[in-house]
Image (cartoon, rainbow, N blue to C red):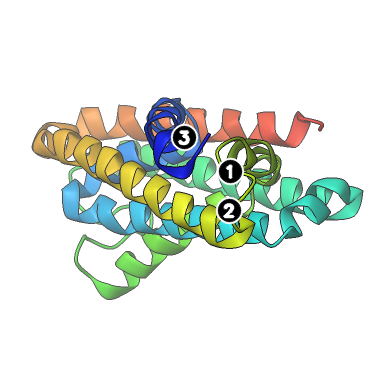
Amino acid sequence: MDLISSLPAFALAVVLISASPGPAMALILRRAALHGFSGAVPTVLGLEAGLYLWALLAAAGLTTLVAASEVAFLILRVVGAGFLLYLGIKAWRSAWRSRDTGKAAEKVAAGEQGPGSSPSWWRAFGEGSVVMLANPKIAAFMIAFYPQFVPADRPLFATTALFAVLQVAVETVLYLTLAAAVGRAGAWFRRPVIRRRLDAVSGTVLVALGLRLAAESR
């Protein structure tokens, strides 16, 4: 398989993978619902920055070391699970606090700042990056995924970096389209009762994902 003919299959695989539910999807949906499209942009960019870094590490062979090392794999799994649990509990606290105080309609809740502020932008970017980088399953995925599409006569690092650019581009378009669609209904999502339920549901999903990551083995 040459490089050009492998691109359609690679793009299709990326679309199918991106559409599967997981921490990335949960973060984007919550951010877009509560902060609108502009609030979801840094989360998407953070996730894709983490993904691209993993791809470069895979091309350099470092992900193989992570996947093979029991200690490194365990550390990433604990950090990733802990961060997902932190985000989930934070959403639960937001739901509980809004019920107690009656301020669920505020844009700033549970310590979050409104969209457009610099700290909030970087916090959302950082959350996306950490969720992606602290998931050891991504390392294992990269090892198995990219070599299928890299022709034997092509340089591994440069070709993987090229495929990673395509994956980032495809996922960014898909995730931003999703964020735009959800953001259109932002006013409805920010209604007191709806926001409280969204916080409770998204918190439960993130906690469940964190527990699953903590319990998973290789």
Residue 170 seen: yes
Separation of disc 3 and disc 1 at Cα? Answer: 42 Å
Q: Earlier in the sequence, mark 3 or mark 2?
A: 2
The amino acid marked with disc number 2 is Arg
Residue 48 left/right relative to 207? left
- SS for callout 1: loop
Separation of disc 1 and disc 2 at Cα? Answer: 5 Å
Q: Position of residue 75 (x, y in %)?
A: 79, 54
Q: Earlier in the sequence, mark 3 or mark 1?
A: 1
- SS for callout 3: helix
Which is closer to the viewer, label 3 or label 1? 1
The numbered mark at residue 154 is: 2
Residue that carries the numbered disc 1 in the rendered image: 151
Residue 63 left/right relative to 95? right
The amino acid marked with disc number 3 is Gly
The amino acid marked with disc number 1 is Pro
Q: Are marks 1 and 2 in contact (CB under 8 Å)?
A: yes
Residue that carries the numbered disc 3 in the rendered image: 203
